[in-house]
Image: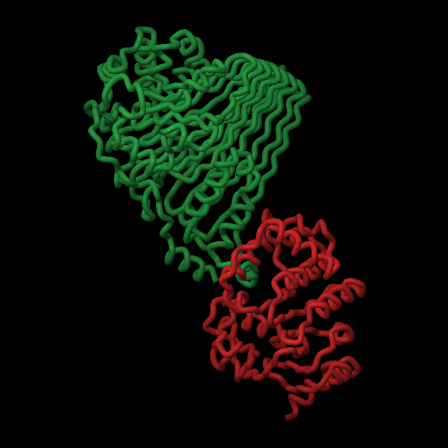
Amino acid sequence: MEKDQDKLLNDVTSGEYKYGFYTDIETDSIARGLTEDTVKLISAKKSEPDWLLDFRLKSFRQWQTMKMPAWANLKIPHIDYQDIIYYAAPRQRPALASLDELDPELKKTFDKLGIPLEEQKHLAGVAVDAVMDSVSVKTTFRETLAESGIIFCSFSEAVKEYPELVRRYLGTVVPYTDNFFATLNSAVFSDGSFCYIPKGVRCPMELSTYFRINAANTGQFERTLLVADEEAYVSYLEGCTAPMRDENQLHAAVVEIIAENNAEVKYSTVQNWYPGDKDGKGGIFNFVTKRGMCRGENSKISWTQVETGSAITWKYPSCILKGDNSTGEFYSVAVTNHHQQADTGTKMIHIGKNTKSTIVSKGISAGLGQNSYRGLVKVLRNASGARNFSQCDSLLLGSRCGAHTFPYIEVDNQTAIVEHEATTSKIGEDQIFYCNQRGISTEDAIALIVNGYAREVINKLPMEFAVEAQKLLQISLEGSVG
Amino acid sequence: MLIISNLNASIDGKSILKGISLEVKAGEVHAIMGPNGSGKSTLAAVLAGREFAQVTEGTVTYMGRNLLEMPAEDRAREGIFLGFQYPIEIPGVSMVNFMKTAVNEHRKYKGLEPLSASDFLKLMRDKKELVEIDSKLANRSVNEGFSGGEKKKNEIFQMAMLEPRLAILDETDSGLDIDALRIVANGVNKLKKPDNSTIVITHYQRLLDYIVPDVVHVLYDGRIVRTAGKELALELEAKGYDWIRKEVNNS
């Protein structure tokens, strides 16, 4: 019976990647390789102030002393950091006043991705910052948001228009010395989104950033900085895709979130980078550092991620629970099919009193995919009354994939309560047959079971994206009959 | 409706069904009885399209079509329903979602539009009443944490939802107390229509007190060794299966 399953798996592994096209657009890119001059060149291209150039150079020097981390449960091929282009921008006229001036090819690209850049056409109530390769090409609804004092723009614009805000918060949650990839990002980051929600403002619409890698041989290093001032609320979503290529491409982003007193930030990710083909050729290497700081009392940061893409994912969206009574949440569905590998999870650092954290991680492995959950729950000495609940489930489809769990728990306060639950299950042939016997085809049965399994996490996504995520799960697992 | 002719099937090379022939006409209730290991469940599995049993010889014609060529989901959509001896648990999938998918797949097959949410919920309510199933069961995951009796009632509930032409109930009475047995049997009887048929597979006679068969077959060692009216079931109850065993072995 095992043999039949494997045969089925072999027969039909044609989950198609819909976003694999490439846009032929004139690109302004710099030469391959990374030296101090590269860093200076990127900074000069963006006419940055000296303090930011200093930040980059400090980071670069630090990075030169660092080694790529090897502790993850991943087989990472050699990456030649001198063979990557660190800056590539679609060439367009400067000072983009209205959408009419946007390159039609660029507009078409985002239309094709289902991200229309015209405000009237867009999903009601979602503002988008569209980033292609190294630069932001368009941010919608900026004016509407500005009416409530919300700043939502590309990182480069923020540096020019709100240098004090950027300077106050940049690197405060993820310091430039943090880790190999974050440090690399700090040296060469090109663009990204900046968002500031002022005191007492509830952001009236979903904010989102859409990342697109287009140019070949290019790495994408974007930076997102999100600040929710006292009593503010924002829900933020990011999506991402890339063309199908035989070469691997590097994506090393940094996301920093700051939540002040009574502020709440919900950050959702639907990650759909090109995963490589069914033989494991090509695909994005996704090495991302995401961290939120609950700085204020009663603040809350919630991460929700649906990870279906990338050849390799290395990502641990974390919360530092510094303010008393602050809350951190992490909800994750990670799918690995074919040759994909994921080592993902979270860190919850309890510093303040009565801090709470919840971790729900659902791994799905199919084909030859390897899926690891790695999580740290750390309760510091003064964090009396800290509470954590973790649940890590793994679902296996077929007999050649793998699921691994690496939970770390460090507790230095006697009053803390930390719970950890874990399960591993397999979609059984008998479950599929039961569905078949009720008239449900095998593909639909798998989708039903997988969606049921992931429901708890999918439900945390904003509604429009929950539907999208469900479809994505289905496509990612197409053909992976177990 | 169903014509089985000289059906031979094996599991992992071991011959289980050894030349079964029987015909079920529209509106009939057939009981298949027999000792453990006689091939009753294998017969049900072959009819439903479970692949672990390999058909080596013979034919099965259902509504004039070659049943053995149809994939399991098409057999279901054509009106064959299997009540499982051991219903399967599917964690995370609610009964509502499961049934909605199933009902709408059946409708799609017939070229009908999917049911609206409110029509579907109304249908569920009606059928739940019909089979006296606890309303809360429908909000839980498919069979997860159900007691043995709840699982069997849930099978009858699904049967009510899907309105099959041919229901095959595989040991639906096993593990039921007398009250649950009565509810399950009542459900089956209420769902009975002049043009649909039922095959009741059972080890014991007691279910047949409630679901009265037109024909009783005794399956022994992969063969049908006796076929008669409902009185055969009573005879078996009184004498056990040993006399059948002896008779077959002597002949």
Residue at image location 70% in from the left, 57% down from the top = B126
Give the quadrant of residue A172.
Answer: top left
Left or right of residue B239: residue A204: left
Q: Nearer the viewer, residue B43 or B132?
A: B132
Left or right of residue A206: residue B196: right
Q: Nearer the viewer, residue A52 or A174?
A: A52
> Looking at the image, is A309 positioned above or below residue B21?
above
Q: Please, which residue is most extreme toward the bottom here?
A: B251
In the rendered picture, chain A carries what hue? green
> Looking at the image, is A268 positioned above or below residue B150?
above
Where residue A55 sits: x, y (%)? 34, 11
- Could you tell me how many numbered marks the image carries? 0
Colour scheme of the picture = by chain
The chain coloured red is: B
Q: Is residue A253 visible?
A: yes
Residue at image location 66% in from the left, 61% down from the top = B155
Where residue B213 sits: x, y (%)? 71, 79
Residue at image location 48% in from the left, 43% down from the top = A470
Left or right of residue A460: residue B126: right
Where residue B22 sits: x, y (%)? 59, 83
Q: Nearer the viewer, residue A325 or A160?
A: A160
Q: Is residue B95 visible?
A: no
Where residue A235 sits: x, y (%)? 51, 26
